[in-house]
Image (cartoon, grey):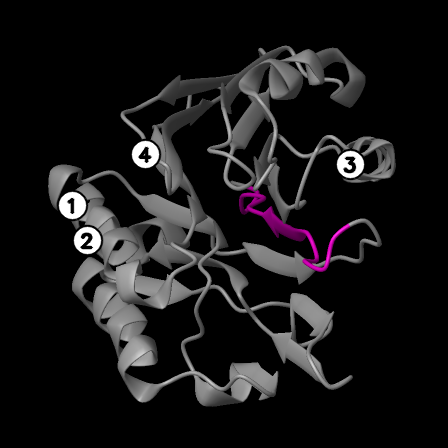
Amino acid sequence: MSCLSWNCRGLGNTSTVKELRDLAKKVAPTVLCVLETQVHKARVEGLKNTLGYDNVFPLSSAGRGGGHGIYWNNNTRVEILPLSQYHIDAIVTENGHDPWRLTCIYGEAQVAERHKTWDMLKFIKASSNLPWVCIGDFNEVLHRDEHQGVQERSRAQIEGFREMVDICGLYDLGFVGRKWTLGKKVVGGNFCRVRLDRALATADWCSRFPLAQVSHLAAAASDHDPILLRWDRVVER
């Protein structure tokens, strides 16, 4: 069982769609989350069969930014909950097991407004006792060494992220692969490499899925790398 999350920076591009289709075929995620689609929800919905899924819940972009979508098949029950421009929230039930909560995140891009994402996550935590995992592009780092290069982040914005993580009782699930998920060239020819994409989970979710692992994958069609969360269960004797 797995969830693939990718800030694909636009599904209007043929090469992006092809790479997404190839990724979906290669890793066959149980749930596929696409962020920053930058297209109308009809386009996201229209890719359902191309990507090999029975179901999709799309959100349209606002102007040139935003837009998200979540895909899944009929062998997994996904109940969509109230959502926002920053997230798609769902209750997941697999093969008759107890339900848990999955939130696909796109953090507010404007630093001054990023607290809105943190406030939203605090509200979700306060409103539910289900085991919970959040995955996506948080647009922030938890530690200074997760940002390499120019455009360093202030202590205050990092602390805002850390405060939310502490209040919600979330734990970083770590990763395997290269250290960053965003790599781009900035003004002056310098590079900026940042770990913006991650998965965070509550202790009860981690206890249920002790073998959970996040992998940083490679992609050419976006400056963000996809991340893959696997949550295979321990075999019961």
The residue carrying mark 2 is 119
The residue carrying mark 4 is 84
Q: Position of residue 154 (x, y in %)?
A: 36, 85
Instruction: Say if mark 4 contacts mark 2, CB within 8 Å.
Output: no
Label 3 or label 4, whichever lies nearer to me, is 4
Q: Position of residue 51 (x, y in %)?
A: 76, 22
Snapshot quadrant of residue 12: top right
Give the CA distance from mark 2 to mark 3. Answer: 31 Å
| Visible residue check, residue 133 | yes
Of the numbered discs in the image, which one, if any, rests on residue 20? 3
Q: Is the residue 213 above or below the residue 123 in the image? A: below
Q: Residues within 10 Å of mark 3 (few under 14, many from 20)?
A: many
Instruction: Say if mark 1 contacts mark 2, CB within 8 Å.
Output: yes
The magenta stretch spans which residues? 222-235
- Under circle 1, the secondary element is helix
At 52% from the left and 60% from the top, the residue drawn is 198
Looking at the image, tell me whether mark 4 or mark 2 is earlier in sequence order.
Answer: 4
* Between 46 and 231, the one nearer to me in the picture: 46
The residue carrying mark 1 is 123
At 53% from the left and 66% from the top, the residue drawn is 196
At 23% from the left and 47% from the top, the residue drawn is 120
Label 1 or label 2, whichever lies nearer to me, is 2
At 41% from the left and 27% from the top, the residue drawn is 92
Looking at the image, tell me whether mark 3 or mark 1 is earlier in sequence order.
Answer: 3
Q: Residues within 10 Å of mark 1 (few under 14, many from 20)?
A: few
Instruction: Say if mark 1 contacts mark 4, CB within 8 Å.
Output: no
Q: Residues within 10 Å of mark 2 (few under 14, many from 20)?
A: few
Q: Position of residue 156 (x, y in %)?
A: 27, 82
Q: Is the residue 112 above or below the residue 122 in the image? A: below
- Under circle 2, the secondary element is helix
